[in-house]
Image (spheres, grey):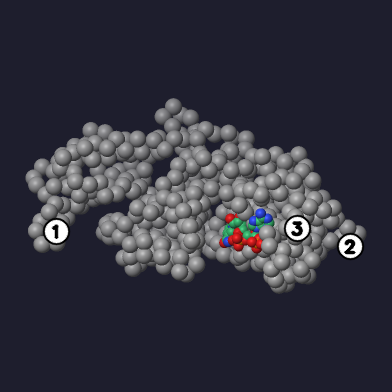
Amino acid sequence: MSDAKNEIGVAVLGLGNVGSQVVRIIEESASDLAARIGAPLKVRGIGVRRVDTDRGVPADLLTDNIEELVSRDDVDIVVEVMGPVEPARKAILAALEQGKSVVTANKALMAASAGELAAAAESAHVDLYFEAAVAGAIPVIRPLTQSLAGDTVVRVAGIVNGTTNYILSEMDSTGADYASALADAGALGYAEADPTADVEGFDAAAKAAILASIAFHTRVTSDDVYREGMTKVSAADFASARALGCTIKLLAICERITDNEGQERVSARVYPALVPLEHPLASVNGAFNAVVVEAEAAGRLMFYGQGAGGAPTASAVLGDLVMAARNRVQGGRGPRESKYAKLPIAPIGLIPTRYYVNMNVADRPGVLSAVAAEFSKREVSIAEVRQEGMVDEGGQRCGARIVVVTHQATDAALSETVAALADLDVVQDINSVLRLEGTTE
Ligand code: NAP
């Protein structure tokens, strides 16, 4: 503790959506938080870019000198809610090296630099907490690191990006195409002006890296995560998914798998996938998030709630702040990083899943058997085929659409099959190839 009044000095870096809610809750709940911690929290300073803007906090708290703020002797804990990777990384490293505990909501940073930051926290014997970096308000980091510390986690799968879930839910419920659902999400404030990080899966991949690292005691970074965005999912895919009793979700999946040589590996991947309507993730709609954890002894656990937004994210930040402050008061620190397993990363080609392939074909006899033969040659077993005729603008038959759903096959076998299908002269277009998750047949 930094002073004789036993106050815990806090520096808050960032006063935007999340930071302003963090500061509000610290002020409004001061006496409850003091009772829970055993000492009062005191905000010593707030780091922003523009100090001359009125923000409803005492002006003397604002500073644009982040380096000076995190180095102050009366600061015990640094709360980093400014993003992006830099200058946040530099500020957090400086804070840790000077013996301050750190709470951050910065998923991009934790997915890229967790090792470096954890090492700095370890040498300084301080806490580094990041519950808010994955799925906003939803407690998932602490359950994985603490509640399930004695169990063996085998799979973590979730919807961890509210923007894309909002867009996909809109497409499903209204029949809208991707562009108009994205425009709606932007108008309602669910999508940023540049939605690339969300719709191309980068944000979900960062969260998958964090979840996989913790669940499997192995360092996993964003670069290890296989990633496909959801911009090519079409209204026609939703219609086909419905006919198959499914919806489509952008999933982050982290799995412990055993390869053909008996080697245990970690798979972390993000892609849009068909999900059966009876699966718990199928009913997670709008901007909500959910994470399903499967552990050997616990079985299946589901965490659901608001994955973003100022106040929900601030709730997770405050939870970490209270933990770090309690540790300061009582002496000691929370659990350290656990990366002992050091499992290799599984390449996507090894991963078995079910597939949905939607293609336009010539409308003539023998087409179906030619298509089926390409699957069979690569031992990709077909579970279901649907075919419907297509008509042109003049009402003339102009081909057929075939939807094939496979049993489990490796990504490598399916990719070869799709390449061979595209070369068949009876196949006019491969409209889409999506995975089907949530069933194993
Ligand atoms: P935001 O609204 O854009 O606010 C960012 C704040 O940080 C602003 O106050 C900004 O100062 C300050 N800042 C940015 N760069 C700075 C710099 N170089 N030096 C000093 N101050 C700087 O962001 P946010 O939505 O609150 O998100 C903050 C962090 O939380 C990000 O890492 C984000 O990924 C994470 N997060 C956000 C959510 C969410 O729902 N928003 C959910 C989970 C995690 P000015 O005000 O002067 O511009």
**Image point (78%, 55%), residue name:** 69
Instruction: Write down the residue under mark 3.
Output: 11
**Image point (66%, 67%), residue name:** 21
- SS state under label 3: strand
Instruction: Write down the residue under mark 2.
Output: 5
In whole angstroms, how far apart are the C-alphas of marks 2 and 3? Answer: 17 Å
Instruction: Write down the residue under mark 1.
Output: 392
Earlier in the chain: of badge 1 and badge 2, it is 2
Q: Which x, y percent locates residue 205?
A: 50, 47
Q: Which amino acid lies under the numbered mark 3 shown in the image of this protein? A: Ala
Of 122 and 206, nearer the camera is 206
Crowdedness of circle 3 by 10 Å Cα count: few (<14), some, many (20+)? many
- Occupied quadrant, residue 336: top right
Of 24 and 254, nearer the camera is 24
Earlier in the chain: of badge 3 and badge 1, it is 3
Quadrant of the image where one finds ligand 1: bottom right
Quarter of the picture holding the C terminus: top left
Please give left or right for residue 143 compared with residue 318 in the image: left
